[in-house]
Amino acid sequence: VQLQASGGGLVQTGGSLRLSCAASGITFSYSATAWFRQAPGKEREFVASLGRTDGRTYYADSVKGRFTVSRDNAKNTVYLQMNNLSPPDTAVYYCAARPSYSDSVFYLKGADYNYWGQGTQVTVSS
């Protein structure tokens, strides 16, 4: 299984980025998926999750209303659309996945996931 995250970069405050996570060896439509992030000197934190089949989502309070997680089943790719970015959003962003038989979105811990992407750096300048 491989998860390939991409789309990070440098953006000014108020800007937008869309991260992508393409998978091989696992089918996202049969999986729960999530995005996490880790800022320098801080622990990894949950950002957003997407349920297996019905498209339910769950967001950390810090990104609610600004970030949107979605999936393209045909491309087996999960996205994180990030709008109105600010310097506290600066971090390495990781996608994660786990095979799932339920539509739960409440897999909020890193230990809940079996597979991880390599991370993509997002830097927001003030």
Image (cartoon, grey):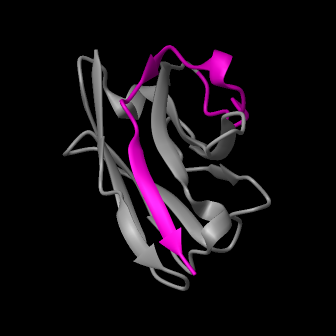
- Identify the image quadrant of residue 74: top left
- Residue 51 x, y percent position in the rendering: 56, 39
25 up-or-down from 43: above or below = above
Who is closer to the viewer here, 19 or 98? 19
- Residue 97 x, y percent position in the rendering: 47, 26
- Which quadrant does the N terminus fall into? top left
Residue 36 in the magenta stretch? The answer is no
**On the picture, is 7 further left or further right than 95?**
left
Who is closer to the viewer here, 54 or 16? 16
Who is closer to the viewer here, 42 or 113? 42
- Residue 29 x, y percent position in the rendering: 38, 34
Residue visible at 28% across and 44% down? 73
Highlighted magenta segment, given as a residue range: 102-126
Who is closer to the viewer here, 69 or 72? 69
Residue visible at 50% across and 35% down? 33
Residue 114 in the magenta stretch? The answer is yes
Residue visible at 61% across and 62% down? 89
112 up-or-down from 38: above or below = above
Q: State the residue lying farthest toward the right.
A: 61
- Residue 37 x, y percent position in the rendering: 58, 43
- Identify the image quadrant of residue 120: top left
122 up-or-down from 50: above or below = below
- Which quadrant does the C terminus fall into? bottom right
Q: State the residue lying farthest toward the bottom.
A: 14
Count of numbered marks: 0
